[in-house]
Image (cartoon, rainbow, N blue to C red):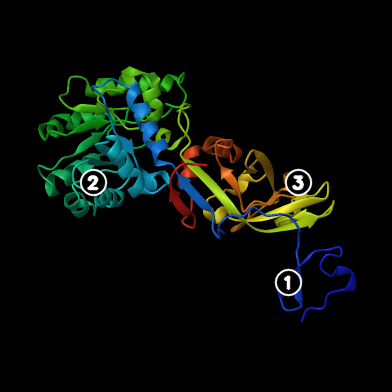
């Protein structure tokens, strides 16, 4: 049986909660809690209606003769390849882009036989069976890949990726000059390149790459693609025949009109009162400057919440901002909820309309792509409207 000091009995000073018979345990912080269904893991809400709205808006930027595809690599930018792709198919997408053949195989199983699936990494050694079995279209990047395609999958669809100046993937102009005729004799379905600086509209590299791509492809009887999200927003001269939006679908910059697609809510495990001068978290990097209420939440860098977010980032209870205090650890985050005036919700929101994916990216000195694709597997994923 617990021994309760006489001056600490229930109702006389510090509050205690009965756990059976005459046994009581002290409440660390006597604050009213929001009544909701309990939640033990962080929650990731994905608004597929917002996703498809973003696709339709980007589709409307180009003319009717331009096909708008969708990039769904990296597990649909971290949001779930199957649900994301199925929603986009329902919206009208008939051409998808993935990074590697394994992603393409998973995508094919999710969306069925009809949409075209292009693989940016091309025809890698060991990919032949996957490409054939799942009807994937490799975007050939080199002479070696071209030979592999012709020898192992003769007559099967393929595209070609051209390097217009990014120096990453694709055939350089001189290589393309030497291989163009034999490549075109096998009737590729698409010629594509990728812009290095499309998120900076005034960057001279955009026009240089446009001119290089035109020089490599003008006059050839095959469809062309240069623009992802940023390229779409540069204007119609960058659209060619096929666009392939990615991050803009998921609510990221540079598509400023994008609707938010993702919300992250973190459950509160415990709250405690700390006095002025007390610290929280590893390294004592934060010290209370006033009597404070600290909430400990069930998420951390193992869930893709980067440690660098800590000093600048807030968690939200409705419209009230609660700053992260102390270091973000593997599984836990501490936040100052003093300004909630005694109210303790079941969870606080990290990613929402007030703190978008790009705000989080700025706080972590990274990009929205990394924030989304870093999201871990422990989230309870829910597909529906954001709150």
Q: State the residue at coordinates (17%, 50%).
A: 132
Q: State the residue at coordinates (10%, 32%).
A: 185
Callout 3: helix, strand or loop? loop
Q: Nearer the viewer's eye, disc 2 or disc 3? A: 3
Crowding at label 3, few (<14), some or many (≥20) Cα neighbours within 10 Å? few
Q: Give above or below for 51 relative to 111.
A: above
Where is mark 3, residue-wise?
A: 341
Where is mark 1, residue-wise?
A: 18
Sequence-first disc among 2 and 3: 2
Where is mark 2, residue-wise?
A: 123
Are circles 1 and 2 on residues that touch, CB within 8 Å? no
Mark 3 vs mark 1, CA separation in Å: 25 Å
User: Where residue 187 sits: x, y (%)?
Assistant: 12, 33
Does residue 274 appear in the picture of this structure? yes
Are circles 3 and 1 on residues that touch, CB within 8 Å? no
Mark 2 vs mark 3, CA separation in Å: 60 Å
User: Where residue 236 sits: x, y (%)?
Assistant: 33, 18
* The label number, if any, that marks residue 325 in the structure image: none
Q: State the residue at coordinates (19%, 30%).
A: 178
Crowding at label 2, few (<14), some or many (≥20) Cα neighbours within 10 Å? many
């Amino acid at each position: 049986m617990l021994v309760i000091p006489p001056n600490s009995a229930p109702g006389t000073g510090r509050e205690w909660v009965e756990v059976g018979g005459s046994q009581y345990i002290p409440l660390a912080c006597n604050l009213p809690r929001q009544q909701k269904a309990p939640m033990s893991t962080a929650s990731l809400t994905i608004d597929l209606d917002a996703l498809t709205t973003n696709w339709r808006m980007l589709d409307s930027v180009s003319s009717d003769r331009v096909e708008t595809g969708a990039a769904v690599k990296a597990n649909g930018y971290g949001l779930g390849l199957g649900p994301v792709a199925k929603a986009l198919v329902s919206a009208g997408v008939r051409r998808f882009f993935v990074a590697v053949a394994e992603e393409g195989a998973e995508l094919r199983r999710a969306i069925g036989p009809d949409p075209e699936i292009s693989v940016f990494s091309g025809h890698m050694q060991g990919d032949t069976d996957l490409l054939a079995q799942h009807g994937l279209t490799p975007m050939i990047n080199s002479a070696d890949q071209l030979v592999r395609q012709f020898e192992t999958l003769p007559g099967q669809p393929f595209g070609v990726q051209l390097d217009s100046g990014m120096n990453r993937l694709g055939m350089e102009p001189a290589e393309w000059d030497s291989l163009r005729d034999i490549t075109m004799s096998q009737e590729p379905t698409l010629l594509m390149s990728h812009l290095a600086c499309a998120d900076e509209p005034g960057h001279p590299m955009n026009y240089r790459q446009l001119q290089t791509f035109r020089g490599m492809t003008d006059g050839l009887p095959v469809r062309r693609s240069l623009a992802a999200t940023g390229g779409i927003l540069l204007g119609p001269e960058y659209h060619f025949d096929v666009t392939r939006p990615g991050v803009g679908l998921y609510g990221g910059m540079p598509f400023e009109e994008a609707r938010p697609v993702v919300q992250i809510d973190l459950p509160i495990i415990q709250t405690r009162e700390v006095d002025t001068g007390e610290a929280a978290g590893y390294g004592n990097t934060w010290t209370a400057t006033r009597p404070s209420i600290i909430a400990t939440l069930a998420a951390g860098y193992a869930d893709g919440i980067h440690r660098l977010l800590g000093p600048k980032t807030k968690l939200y209870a409705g419209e009230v901002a609660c700053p992260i205090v102390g270091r973000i650890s593997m599984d836990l985050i501490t936040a100052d909820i003093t300004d909630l005036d005694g109210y303790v919700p079941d969870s606080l929101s990290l990613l929402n309309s007030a703190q978008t994916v790009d705000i989080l990216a700025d706080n972590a000195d990274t990009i929205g792509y990394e924030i989304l694709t870093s999201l871990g597997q422990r989230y309870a994923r829910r597909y529906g409207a954001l709150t």
